[in-house]
Every structure is written in C-alpha cells, then in structure tokens.
Amino acid sequence: MLNRAYPADKITNINPLGSVGPTTLQIAGMLFSGPFLLAGLDFAYLHDQTHAHNTAPDLFERLRQNRFSRSLWYQRAAARDPKKTKSRDGSTVYTDLVLEKYQLVLKNQLSHAFADRKCFSIAGKGLPLGIPCCNPADFFSLISIEDGSSKLPGPGTNERANNIWDFSSTVTPGTEVQTASKKSLFQIKEFIENELAVLETAIKAIKDGSPLPAEVDYVTFGLPANPSQQKIDIMLRYYADRWRLLATRI
C-alpha cells in the first residue's frame, strides 16, 4: 500500500521497533519534513477496553467471544500486571510494562531522531509523549490550513500549553507552499477513494466467487492462516468503513 502511495525509493531500511506507533513515525520521517502531529498513540487502556480496541484483529476476536469465553486480547492483557497512571488529558488510565516500553521507544525517537522537528500530540487517554499537546479541535484547525496560524502549543512548552503557535513560518496564505499543501490533501483524498474502490471491487468478487484483487492482501493481516471467505468479507467491509470515514475528514 505504501508503494502505491509514495515512490518506492522514499521508504528504505525500516527498523523493527515492535510497535505500530514508533514504526509509523519512522516511516513518516522518511516521507515528510514536518511539523508532525501524533494522534492515536495511547500505550494505555481503560477498564474493560483493550489497548487495540476497534482494530481489525480486535474485531475478529470479538466475533469469536461468547458468554463463557472472553476475547484472546482480554486474556493476554490479564496476564500482564496493569498499573494506574495519568493520561495526556489528566484522566486515570491503565498501562503495563510492555506498553510502557513502547512509550519509551517513541519518546526516545522524538528526543533524538526528531529533536530538530516540530512535533505535537493530540490530547486524549494516551500516555504523555514528552512533546506539546493540543486538543482535537486545534488539530483539525491546523490541517485545514485556512489562515496560516493555529492555536497550538509552542515548541518547548509543557504538555498542556495553550499559547499560539505561529504556523505562518511554515505555511503562508497564497504561497506555493500552501498550494502544495492543498494539492497534497487532494492527492491523499484521491488515494483513499482509489483504495475504497478496490475494496468495493473485492467485496463484489467475494459475492461472485471471483479472484480477489492483489491490492487487498493487507485485510487478512492478523487473521489465522487460510481464513474463510466469510471472514475475509467481514474484514473487507471493516476496512471499507474505515476508508469511508477517513475520506469524510479530508
């Protein structure tokens, strides 16, 4: 999928960092120069909610559970001693030794490989990342790039800062940079629409008994070997829903 979205020579030598978050940040650093806004990186969970809540593997496991057997994710989480801690928005969440290790990996990335870049996180139930934090409304205000500025924490401020971060030094209204940014958003939306079209073709192929497009191989990640057509169909529809939701945000 990445090779369909970006030139193949852009993404090289990906180090296995053990977690989706640090790996994604590593890839983003190869593709873009910043600023970086990190959302959805939690390294924590709430009562009766897994760390991987609403992901594709979590959906598949919940389809298997019943009144007598809980999801495998809950069983594995129960095997690790949870501990209470404070999230980025100040609320109480649970974490454990494994998730804290991934949090540390990401914080080390941000303080070393990304030390010279502007990085921000989104407020929420996740663990602090050692970088300025903004609320979701300010995040969407930034990526809209309407007036060249946004209410975001400035570099060097604490996690809950509310001062104005002048974005005009990076994007100025009417400049080629802003035009390029809007063009990039259009390209992203076009890519999402193309991926969604492939998924819809695959859903129809399942119904007709036809071969699946090679581009949808990622939908079986996390499933057991040789999954049934019914399970593949569920995951195709799951990812199609996610692509549709993402398309409405751009």
Image (spheres, helix red, strand yellow):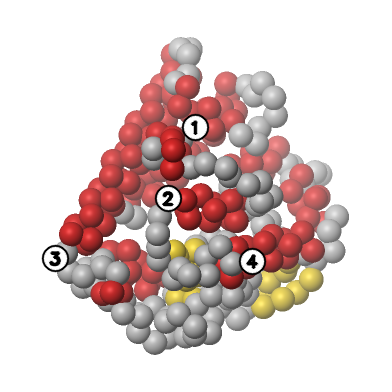
Q: Are marks 1 and 2 in contact (CB under 8 Å)?
A: no
233, 42: nearer the viewer: 42
Q: CA distance from mark 1 to mark 2?
A: 27 Å
Q: CA distance from mark 1 to mark 3?
A: 41 Å
Q: Type of residue at label 4? A: Asn
Q: CA distance from mark 1 to mark 4?
A: 36 Å
| Residue ID at (65%, 36%) | 222
* Number of callouts: 4
Kindly identify which numbered label has been placed on residue 236.
1
- Residue 126 shows up from this direction: no
What is the secondary structure assignment of the residue under circle 4?
A: helix
What is the secondary structure assignment of the residue under circle 3?
A: loop
- In the image: residue 157, left or right of residue 64: left
The location of residue 217, given as percent across then percent down, is 53, 27
| Residue ID at (67%, 57%) | 51
Kindly identify which numbered label has been placed on residue 210.
none
Kindly identify which numbered label has been placed on residue 31.
2
Q: Are marks 1 and 3 in contact (CB under 8 Å)?
A: no
23, 213: nearer the viewer: 23
Q: CA distance from mark 4 to mark 2?
A: 20 Å
146, 167: nearer the viewer: 167
| Residue ID at (56%, 78%) | 89
Tag 1: Cα neighbours inside 10 Å, few (<14), some, or many (≥20)?
many
What is the secondary structure assignment of the residue under circle 2?
A: helix
What is the secondary structure assignment of the residue under circle 1?
A: helix
Nearer to us: label 1 or label 4: 4
Nearer to us: label 1 or label 3: 3
